[in-house]
Image (tube, rainbow, N blue to C red):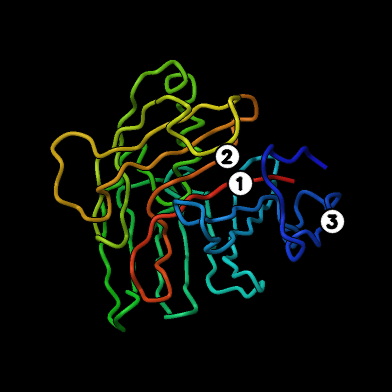
Amino acid sequence: MKKLLPGLSLMSALVAVCPAAAATDETQPWAIGTAWSTDKSEILYREVHFAGDPDHDLTTRVEYRRDNDEVFAEKDIDYSVSTTAPAISQIDHRNQARIVTRHPNPEPGPVVELEVRPHDSDEIRTQAFDYEDGLIIDAGFDPFIREHWDRLAEGRRVTTDFLVPARMDTVHISISKTDNSECNFPSQNMHCFVIKPAGLLRMVSWFVDPIRIAYDTESRRLLMFEGVSNLRDDAGEPRNALIHFEYF
């Protein structure tokens, strides 16, 4: 079994896994994310990550679970056309909200299609966006960070566009290294990065506060995410979350 990240523990309901499972067996989790309120006063939910091949460090399926292990939302991720702008299919079983992105062509470009069913409406909204190299969709920020690792680790800033499904729009963002104390994670063997709007900021309520992410300096795996969650709370309101990750 691969070494667990320091400072984390699994709930007994989530450790009934076989560490020796074959790499192509998607029935066994390869990572767990525990989502806390930002003051760490309560656990909001857990993300159970599965991978077609864990050695690629790419999650291909996520189950979002409550403390009683009930799956209340699910997401499938397909990186076959683009690793930074994957095709995703996410459903929230509490309200049937859906987010789907797809590439209409077998090669990247010229567009990416977005389909959204909001949490408070039966209306299906669709939009096509021009595909640009480096566009980030959902979990694509993780391979994007690793692709630009050396530049970011040296303290240089990287800019790109990030798709925000809730706004049916993209936001131009900057990613840069910051002091480790900015990341709420009990390790010094990490790099802490901050994601902020770049250039002329449009008033996008989704992205008022910066997003902070921490990565292990050796494995280059995501340790911590703090920012707006891709899942609303039970009342349908946006919320911020602090997510700590551990790997098998």
Residue displayed at 27% across by 81% down: 123
- Judge by depth and name the residue closer to the eye, 184 or 65: 184
Amino acid at the residue labelled 2: Leu
- Whether 126 is drawn above or below 143: the answer is below
Q: Are marks 1 and 2 in contact (CB under 8 Å)?
A: yes
Q: Say few, some or many: other residues with alpha carbon within 10 Å of mark 1 (under 14 / 14 to 19 / 20 or more).
A: many
| Sequence-wise first label, 1 or 2 | 2
Residue bearing the label numbered 2: 223
Residue bearing the label numbered 3: 18
**Disc 1 secondary structure class:** strand
| Rendered image quadrant of residue 61 | bottom right
The x, y position of residue 13, in whole percent, is 74, 66
Residue bearing the label numbered 1: 245
**Disc 2 secondary structure class:** strand
Looking at this view, name the residue that lies furthest to the bottom.
122
Q: Say few, some or many: other residues with alpha carbon within 10 Å of mark 3 (under 14 / 14 to 19 / 20 or more).
A: few
Amino acid at the residue labelled 1: Phe
Amino acid at the residue labelled 3: Cys
Label 1 to label 2: alpha-carbon separation: 5 Å
Q: Are marks 3 and 1 in contact (CB under 8 Å)?
A: no
The x, y position of residue 32, in whole percent, is 65, 53
Q: Say few, some or many: other residues with alpha carbon within 10 Å of mark 2 (under 14 / 14 to 19 / 20 or more).
A: many
Residue displayed at 84% across by 56% down: 18
Residue 216, numbered label: none
